[in-house]
Image (cartoon, helix red, strand yellow):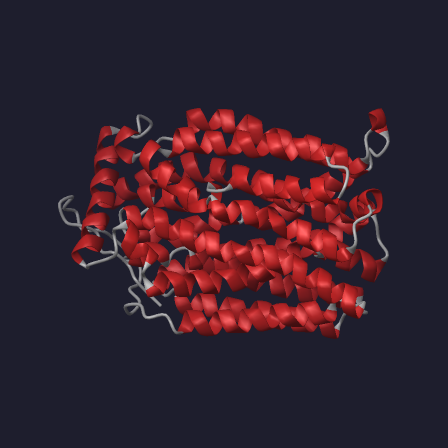
């Protein structure tokens, strides 16, 4: 039985995770690539730091408004068609951003991009709950969510190279950036129709025994959640205090994530005076460190079954990194290492955090609750860049903004530690040979 389990989960991982990972890399690049074009975009469109910060954050206005409807539609019509629609839509809008010409069109493009991409991330998180047993979820979440640091590692040099095309065919460098980086989303959207399978029982790429094992395992987990009175209706998710606490914590996390992501290239450029490929390389360093941390910490959380302590520790680590970035703001090597520590904690929060909502939600509530947490949480993405821009313009330094973000991370850790969850259950070394026995549902703090 253990061999069947390993073989089945290996096939699921190979089929779903790499493709979802590539899609999320493209999504993240399209979401944050204005950070690499910030200086030239501000110059050509006459944008102040405050206006740029507001525009960068406006992505999340449209994004958050359409999150819950998008996830409910995915749960009804299936991931295959709905993910294809999302990716083709955001790719087209991203490419069309090359036509912006002033503040209003900049704002409109960011809102439309958010609307087009709404539902992708929570949709994948929901989709994984159909295919991946809870005891494996933090590790698989980590493999998927490493896309964010990879997007910065890959996006930095690629964006730098595209910006160097400035003037070719009469286009500005940032126009080449939006045009070329939006196209892969459209192509991946078409591929999604072939790669994604809606449910395990429909997976022709699994053997009959593998399909039966996975279907029974996931059905057993859903039954166990229902027996434990886990919230399963739409209304229960919207009125669940734990959902709102998680939403608040995720709001603070997103506030920091995008407050850093959309300003980091500019912070390092101002500190170092570097441009082009050399700037791209030092910008990538923190995300290389984060990449390793996400996988190691996610796997450790799965082994121990512990959740909330991991999230809180990572948030405090990230806060420490931001405080050190203020201390070492005039020392470029130490500044980069400080951001590396910050990103190690910041990005590792994500893989473990998203293992918590399925522990308290089931059925329709999982679709709505995951979308609600991501929707409200990502409103922080609208405020983070704006706060950094406003404080930068008011103080002529990045220090005040970074200290505000560090404070947000400390509050996030406190909120997560206050969450009431069952005691941790480590992942078992082996499974019972009886297919009829439901595998235990891990829980943890």
The residue closer to the viewer here, 434 or 136, is 136
The location of residue 318, given as percent across then percent down, is 58, 67
In terms of image quadrants, where is residue 26? top right
Residue sticking out furthest to the front: 104
* Left or right of 349, for residue 206: left
Picture residue at 32% right of the left edge, 35% below the top: 76
Left or right: where 379 falls relative to 55: left
Image-based side of 362 in relation to 306, left or right: left
Which corner quadrant of the image does residue 209 belong to? top left
Asked whether residue 51 is in view, the answer is yes
Residue 194 drawn above or below residue 296: above
| Residue 338 position within the rendered picture, expressed as x and y whole percent measured from the top left | 68, 67
**In the image, is residue 187 above or below residue 60?**
above
* In this picture, residue 342 sits left or right of residue 221: right
Q: Quadrant of the C terminus?
A: bottom left
Position in image of residue 231 (x %, y %): 25, 56
Is 417 above or below relative to 277?
Answer: below
């Amino acid at each position: 039985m253990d061999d069947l389990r390993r073989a089945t989960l290996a096939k699921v991982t190979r089929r779903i995770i790499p493709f979802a990972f590539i899609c999320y890399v493209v999504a993240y690049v399209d979401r944050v690539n204005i950070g690499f074009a910030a200086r030239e975009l501000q110059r050509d469109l006459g944008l102040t730091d405050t206006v740029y910060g507001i525009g960068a954050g406006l992505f999340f206005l449209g994004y958050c408004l359409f999150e819950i409807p998008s996830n409910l539609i995915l749960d009804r019509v299936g991931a295959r068609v709905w993910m294809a629609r999302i990716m083709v839509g955001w790719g087209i809008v991203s490419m069309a951003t090359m036509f912006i010409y002033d503040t209003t069109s900049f704002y409109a493009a960011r809102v439309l991009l958010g609307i087009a991409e709404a539902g992708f991330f929570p949709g994948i998180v929901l989709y994984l709950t159909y295919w991946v047993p809870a005891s494996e979820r933090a590790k698989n979440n980590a493999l998927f969510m490493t896309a964010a640091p990879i997007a910065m590692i890959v996006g930095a040099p690629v964006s730098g190279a595209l910006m160097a095309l400035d003037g070719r065919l009469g286009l500005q460098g940032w126009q080449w950036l939006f045009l070329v980086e939006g196209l892969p989303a459209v192509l991946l959207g078409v591929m999604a129709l072939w790669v994604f399978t809606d449910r395990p029982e429909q997976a022709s790429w699994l053997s009959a025994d593998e399909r039966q094992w996975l279907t029974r395992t996931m059905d057993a987990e859903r039954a166990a959640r229902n027996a434990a009175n886990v919230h399963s209706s739409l209304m229960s998710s919207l009125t669940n205090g734990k959902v709102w606490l998680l939403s608040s914590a995720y709001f603070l996390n997103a506030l920091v994530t995008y407050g850093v992501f959309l300003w980091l290239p500019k912070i390092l450029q101002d500190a170092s005076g570097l441009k082009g490929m050399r700037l791209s390389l030092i910008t990538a360093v923190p995300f290389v460190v984060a990449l390793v941390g996400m996988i190691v910490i996610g796997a450790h959380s799965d082994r121990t079954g512990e959740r909330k302590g991991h999230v809180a520790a990572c948030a405090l680590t990230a806060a420490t990194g931001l405080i050190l970035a203020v201390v070492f703001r005039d020392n470029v090597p130490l500044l980069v290492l400080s951001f590396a520590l910050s990103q190690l904690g910041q990005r590792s929060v994500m893989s473990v955090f998203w293992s918590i909502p399925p522990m308290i939600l089931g059925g329709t509530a999982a679709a709505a609750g995951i979308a609600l947490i991501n929707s409200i949480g990502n409103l922080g993405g609208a405020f983070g860049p704006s706060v950094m821009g406003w404080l930068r313009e008011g103080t002529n330094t990045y220090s005040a903004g970074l200290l505000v973000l560090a404070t947000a991370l400390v509050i996030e850790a406190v909120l997560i530690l206050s969450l009431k969850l069952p005691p941790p259950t480590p992942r078992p070394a082996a499974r019972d040979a009886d297919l009829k026995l439901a595998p235990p549902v891990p829980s943890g703090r």
